[in-house]
Amino acid sequence: MSVPARRSALDRHYRIGRSGARVEDAPGVLLAESRPRSMVQLNGAPEPDVLAAALGPSEDEVAANRTFHAGSVRYAWNGPDQWLAESDEQGPSELIAHIENALRDHGASTTDLSHARTVARVSGPAATDLLAKLCPIDVEAMRGGDSAVTLAGPFNVQVVKSGHEEFRLYVFRSFGLALWEMLQDEAAEFGAEIVAVG
């Protein structure tokens, strides 16, 4: 039996282009959807030193409210003993098998969330200002690689600062379109541009 293709919650609503204030100027905010090949929730993860030894990064990279890379997999902390793993190269079953094999002696569990999250990438010189309007946490204090579970407007989100003036927002798929529309509306004052999925 064939597996149905995954479909983004934004598919029929994704319109590349400029909007908002100062359209003649460079946009203050760039918005894009990110579509990693797989996303897996890791629950019951062992202590950071054990997790680091099992997955490969140095021990000082594995910490609460942070992210780390292990090979082609990105891990973002999203609660005590919890991590969201993403891969652009491995499919969900491969990623689950990889994690479960590495942690088979530690009682951790995995859940495929590849179909269950929408990921919005927010970047540009006004990205921090936009998220500061929407999130109750101190977005300006976030360092590159920080991860926080918080709100964006009324939505529960995981916010990862993925680079200089760049953030990723993870939300339940059922709220994906509503979050996307809110980001467009709130970015209008800065000048916004929706760019290609990436």
Image (cartoon, helix red, strand yellow):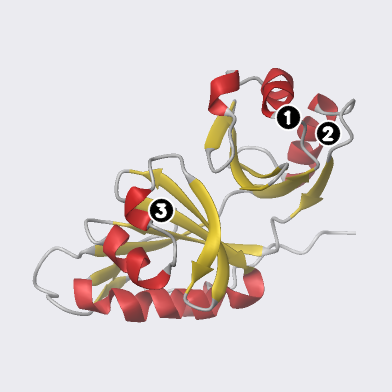
Q: Nearer the viewer, residue 25 or 187?
A: 187
Q: Amino acid at mark 1?
A: Glu
- Direction from residue 151 to residue 184 in the image, left or right: left
How many discs appear? 3
Residue beneath label 2, please?
100
Residue at 12 percent of width and 75 percent of height: 22
Residue beneath label 1, please?
47
Q: Amino acid at mark 2?
A: Glu
Q: Nearer the viewer, residue 167 or 193?
A: 167
Relative vertical location of residue 92 with respect to residue 48 in this rendering, above or below: below
Please tell me the numbered disc located at residue 167. 3
Relative vertical location of residue 114 with respect to residue 10 in this rendering, above or below: above
Q: Position of residue 33 (x, y in %)?
A: 47, 61
Q: Nearer the viewer, residue 12 or 162?
A: 162
Mark 1 Cα-neighbour bin, 10 Å: few <14, some 14–19, many ≥20: few
Q: Earlier in the sequence, mark 2 or mark 3?
A: 2
Inter-mark Cα distance, 2 to 1: 16 Å
- Direction from residue 172 to residue 99 in the image, left or right: right
Inter-mark Cα distance, 2 to 3: 28 Å
Classify mark 3: helix, strand or loop. strand
**Which of the two marks, 1 or 3, is nearer to us in this view?**
1
